[in-house]
Image (tube, helix red, strand yellow):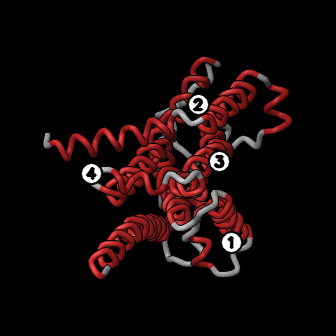
Amino acid sequence: MSAKGGTYQHLMIAELKILLNNHWTLIVLAVYVLFTCGVYFSESFRQTWLQVLDGNLFTTMINLYLPTFLFIAVLLNAAPIFAGDKKNGMEELADTCFYGKTFRKKAKIEATTFYTILITAAVFLVTAAVSLASKTPLDLGSKAFETANLDIRMSNGMFYLFCFAMIILGLIAVASAVVLISSRSDDVIVPLSTGILIYGVELALYLKPLVRILWDVNLWKLLRPYTMLSVSLYFDSTIKALAANVIAFILVSVALFLLTFADGSEISANRALSSQSS
């Protein structure tokens, strides 16, 4: 591995460790573990707080409750990733590094993406572990939502993997928007508010599908993947709605990350031109 490659890898890993060791990550995960234990080990807790989907607790957790905890963790960690440096007066420190601010910005973007994937995987594994510890079977071979939509048939195991992929995609889309705002803001409250606004607007469009395509291509459908098995409002098949949703959010995420990266490149270029003119 080249020196540059090694340096970049170490920088990205360092940024990833900061996100994973952040106190908000630990707090959200701790609260989720307590909530999950309450769900699986307390029948009265389930009866009071839970709406069970398809008679399956694991399906219920990964579709109705787990995404909210993950959203909070990703939002709290993505919001200050650039704005926090500016607020603390640390933004210019990157300019003293050999490869400059653009190099560090790329590392932060990749670290946020890997963080989203890793924390989602960790929470899925924790949920599965608690489920097995409570002797609640995952029923991997059983059919998931067998009567919901005859166009889509999958086992519970396939459905769990499908949920994992869709939730990651939805969270990365949110993270990409929040990171972009963070890169252009001097205060953490701005990207935090942006993430909450996105969540609220998408929820409103999800609950009140006034424009049909905005219900089919909706963040909440990714964060509640079981709703993607329902009949499409805008497309003539559920498969087409699913493909449109995935493609749309992949393109949005890539575009927002590129805008974040391009913003740093543009600033560096403007500074270079200014120094040459002076």
Callout 2 amino acid: Thr
Dot 4 or dot 1: first in sequence order is: 4
Callout 3 amino acid: Ile
Q: Is residue 166 visible?
A: no
Dot 3 or dot 4: first in sequence order is: 3
User: Nearer the viewer's eye, disc 1 or disc 3?
Assistant: 3
Q: Which residue is mark 4?
A: 98
Q: Which residue is mark 2?
A: 127
> In the picture, which quadrant includes the N terminus?
top left
User: In which quadrant of the rendered view does residue 56 lie?
Assistant: top right
Q: Are marks 4 and 2 in contact (CB under 8 Å)?
A: no
**Mark 1 residue element:** helix
- Count numbered badges in the picture: 4
Q: Which residue is mark 1?
A: 205
Instruction: Give the camera-side residue of 87 and 131.
Output: 87
User: In which quadrant of the rendered view does residue 50 lie?
Assistant: top right
Dot 1 or dot 3: first in sequence order is: 3
**Mark 3 residue element:** helix
Q: Which residue is mark 3?
A: 72
